[in-house]
Amino acid sequence: MRKLRILYAGSPLASSLVLKKLLALSAEHGYEICGVLTNPPSTRGRHKELIPTEVARAAVEAGLPVLAFDHVKQEARDAAVPLSCDLLVTFDYGRIFGPKFLALFPLGGINLHPSALPRYRGCTPVPAALLAGDSSLGVAVQKIALKTDEGDILASDEIPLTGVETTLSLMDGDGMQSPVTDRGSALLDSVLCRIVQAAEQDATSGGAGAFARPAGTPQTGEASYTPFINKEDGRIDWTRPAAEIDRKIRAYTPWPLCFTTSNGVQLIIVKAKVGEDCTSEAPGTVLPYRKAVGIEIACGDGRIIVASELQWQSKKAMDYKSFMNGARNFIGSSLA
């Protein structure tokens, strides 16, 4: 019996981690990644060097064909046809698939989405969960539908949240594994195995052993949608409660990062936490420095944010002790 043929679509580091896990499992589980669809290389640095996506890098390492296009149109369809794939599998690809492209795959497509659908449909589900202070992060495999994230659910799980996670730690982790990619790849593998096993059982019963689309469960409950995040969303409003500011800093790490202004210069708060003490100082006031604690900043509810890593605009990030070595007149100043 032939293997289930898959085209994998994705671009950033988290997506490449899922791809690598599926490649490791594919040989013994009866499916095959036949190529990847990803974004074109981007230019970086002064010399405008072309840098391929992390998914493209992983594909090249595995000897897979790389299909890199700005749009999923005729050129992408023409490149995908020779691969003769049965199924499209996606995670963090960032582009919309039209009916003509999906029609290339007899089994359609499935997508890994880090939320408890129908909650947090859209492009920023992980920051949305952290901003809301959720106690868990959902992970779901859904059928790809023509409307964003409205497909039937094929598998789902939850990741408990302790209140210290960032979008970076949940998605990219240590660069080798992360909570979302570990749970997500396991869910995808379970769905792919289900397709393969159903075909094997059909063949054993005297059938053709053809692959069939797996049955899913329609989404239920109230739907919510996540917006695009822009740079200005990272601005800190110190009149807000400390817990809210903490959630925002964690949600917007690694992008766009949270920032404030000190004496007219932009200052990024890279890492911070809610302090144990309270203060009557005005929101945004930098409190007297306690070297063993961190840099304390007053918030709107009288609580304190303790910054442990900071970064001046166009400078490198520093731990708070190194930062204070060169921060003249910073203590007692008012951040805005």
Image (spheres, helix red, strand yellow):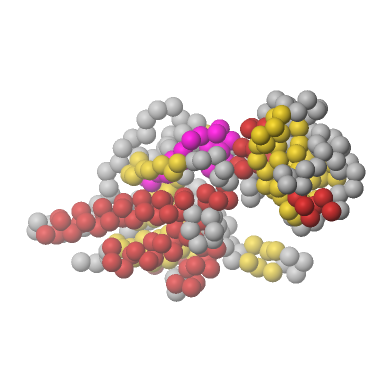
Q: Nearer the viewer, residue 39 or 335?
A: 335
Give, as a single range, the part of the protein colored magenta. 126-147
Quarter-of-image position of residue 185: bottom left
Farthest left residue? 206
Quarter-of-image position of residue 50: bottom right
Q: Nearer the viewer, residue 203 or 189?
A: 189
Q: Residue at x 44, y 27 (%)?
A: 222
Q: Nearer the viewer, residue 105 or 19?
A: 19
Q: Is residue 138 magenta?
A: yes
Q: Residue at x 51, y 40 (%)?
A: 162
Give the x, y percent position of residue 174.
Answer: 54, 59
- Can residue 333 be seen at all in this image of the molecule? yes
Q: Nearer the viewer, residue 291 or 325?
A: 291
The answer to whether residue 42 is left or right of residue 123 is right
The answer to whether residue 10 is left or right of residue 197 is right
Quarter-of-image position of residue 33: bottom left
Q: Is residue 220 magenta?
A: no
**Quarter of the image where the C terminus is located:** top right
Q: Residue at x 53, y 68 (%)?
A: 57
Q: Residue at x 30, y 41 (%)?
A: 216
Give the x, y percent position of residue 181.
Answer: 45, 54
